[in-house]
C-alpha cells in the first residue's frame, strides 16, 4: 500500500501508528519522529496547533508500539529492519574461545604455584637451623616439677 495512493478518508480511519508504519515502510529508511508526525499532520490537515499538542502522545504511542524501534539522535525505524542476525557458528566459536582462555588461565596459575614451591625448596635449610639454636621448648607440665 503506497502512502500517496491512500485517500484522505482512508487515512482518517487509520491510527497514527498505522500511518507511521506505512510511511516508514515506503521510505525504507530511518526518519526523525518529528518528520514522521509532521507528514501525518500535514496529510490529515491537522495544523500546527495539533502537531504541537499531540507530539508527546505520538511519541508515547511510537515508544509503546512494538513495530517501531527508537534509534540514536531522534531517529525511528521499523523493528523489522533491525532484526539481529544470530549465527550459531559464531556463538559456538565465542564459547570455545572462552573455554580455551579459562584453561590457559588455569595452566598459568598451576605454573605460578610450582614456581612458588620450587623457591621454598631452594631455601638454605642450614640457615633455618641457626635461627632456631636458642629456641627453648617449654613443656606444659614443667611448672608442676618446680618447687616453690
Image (cartoon, grey):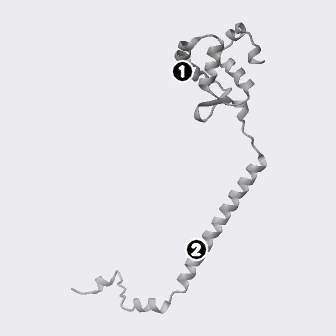
Q: Residue at x 62, y 70 (%)?
A: 108
Look at the picture and state if 48 lies above or below 140.
above
Q: Which residue is mark 1?
A: 56
Total number of numbered labels?
A: 2
Counting from the top left corner in percent of width and height, residue 58 is at 58, 20
Question: Helix, strand or loop at disc 2?
Answer: helix
Q: Which residue is mark 2?
A: 113
Q: Residue at x 62, y 10 (%)?
A: 45
Residue 67, image quadrant: top right
Look at the picture and state if 32 lies above or below 126.
above
Q: On the rendered structure, is 127 left or right of 86?
A: left
Q: Residue at x 74, y 24 (%)?
A: 26
Q: Nearer the viewer, residue 88 or 106?
A: 88
Q: Residue at x 65, y 69 (%)?
A: 107
Q: Nearer the viewer, residue 146 or 25?
A: 25
Question: Helix, strand or loop at disc 1?
Answer: helix
Residue 74, image quadrant: top right
Distance in Å between CA atoms under marks 1 and 2: 63 Å
Q: Nearer the viewer, residue 50 or 113?
A: 50
Amino acid at each position: 500500500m503506497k502512502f500517496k495512493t491512500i485517500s484522505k478518508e482512508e487515512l482518517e480511519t487509520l491510527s497514527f501508528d498505522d500511518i507511521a508504519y506505512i510511511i516508514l515502510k515506503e521510505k525504507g529508511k530511518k526518519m526523525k519522529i518529528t518528520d514522521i508526525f509532521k507528514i501525518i499532520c500535514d496529510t490529515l490537515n491537522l495544523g500546527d496547533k495539533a502537531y504541537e499538542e499531540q507530539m508527546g502522545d505520538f511519541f508515547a504511542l511510537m515508544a509503546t508500539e512494538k513495530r517501531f524501534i527508537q534509534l540514536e539522535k531522534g531517529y525511528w525505524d521499523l523493528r523489522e529492519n533491525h532484526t539481529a542476525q544470530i549465527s550459531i557458528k559464531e556463538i559456538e566459536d565465542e564459547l570455545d574461545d572462552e573455554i580455551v582462555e579459562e584453561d590457559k588461565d588455569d595452566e598459568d596459575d598451576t605454573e605460578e604455584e610450582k614456581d612458588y614451591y620450587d623457591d621454598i625448596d631452594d631455601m638454605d635449610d642450614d640457615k633455618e637451623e641457626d635461627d632456631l639454636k636458642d629456641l627453648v621448648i617449654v613443656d606444659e607440665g614443667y611448672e608442676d616439677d618446680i618447687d616453690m
